[in-house]
Amino acid sequence: MAAARELVIADEPGAWERLGFAPDAGGALALAELRVRLAGRAAGTGLVELRVAGLAAERPDGLPVIAAAGASVGTAAATHPNGATAIDHAVVLTDDCDRTTAALAAAGGDVRRRGGPPELPATMAFVRFGELLVEVAETGGPARFWGLTIAVPDLDALSGPLVGSPRRAVQPGRWIATVQREAGLSIALALISPR
């Protein structure tokens, strides 16, 4: 199975620092075995690259999924002031869940689950690339990375002008809070209680 190694996001490191993350001097931060590189607004908008080791095909369904340069990006464990531990999942929106899911599987992803209403809020599939789970939701428009959800143990401590109040997540027993637009991120970001 192909394994995600690095996510490149077109955000300034300072915006993530204000949310309690600790990027290094080069704008990278570690979340479990994954590295997030904050490339700045000059790189574009949102998640501009997902680098994957063992990828069978690049740019599945037009998504910016490319081969990682080596077998492993190699990140050191990091401690973030907000307590963030791992990326819970990335979100892809698409006009055809089956097509996008098939393309991700052909690229080396492992399809773990499919479902739809009434169990789930939309037609969805969940594809694993090593540690990273990619949630594919059918909502319209071309396939695109829309957001990221990161596990943080104390959501109440982060609630304020940049992070909304925690509410029950779709996943039973978990809570989620949405990072507000005022945070200045180019990607939708949510924080969720750990599994």
Image (tube, helix red, strand yellow):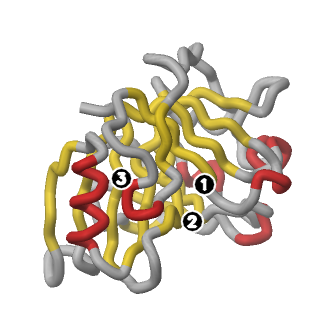
Mark 2 lies on a secondary structure that is: strand
Closer-to-camera residue (56/128) = 56
Q: Which residue is mark 2?
A: 178
Dot 3 or dot 1: first in sequence order is: 1
In the image, is 128 to the left or to the right of 74?
Answer: left
Inspect this view and state whether residue 152 appears.
no
Amino acid at dot 1: Leu
Q: In the image, residue 2 lies at what x, y percent?
A: 31, 33
Whether residue 125 is visible, yes or no, is: yes
Position in image of residue 37 (x %, y %) = 68, 36
Q: Amino acid at mark 3?
A: Val
Q: Residue at x 54, y 24 (%)?
A: 69
Q: Residue at x 17, y 77 (%)?
A: 116
Instruction: Determine whether, in the image, residue 36 is placed left or right of residue 105.
Output: right
Instruction: Name the residue that disc number 3 marks.
Output: 134
Mark 2 or mark 3: which is in front? 3
Provide the secondary structure element on which disc 1 rests. strand
Point out the tag, 2 or 3, that comes first from the N-terminus.
Answer: 3
Q: Position of residue 65 (x, y in %)?
A: 47, 48
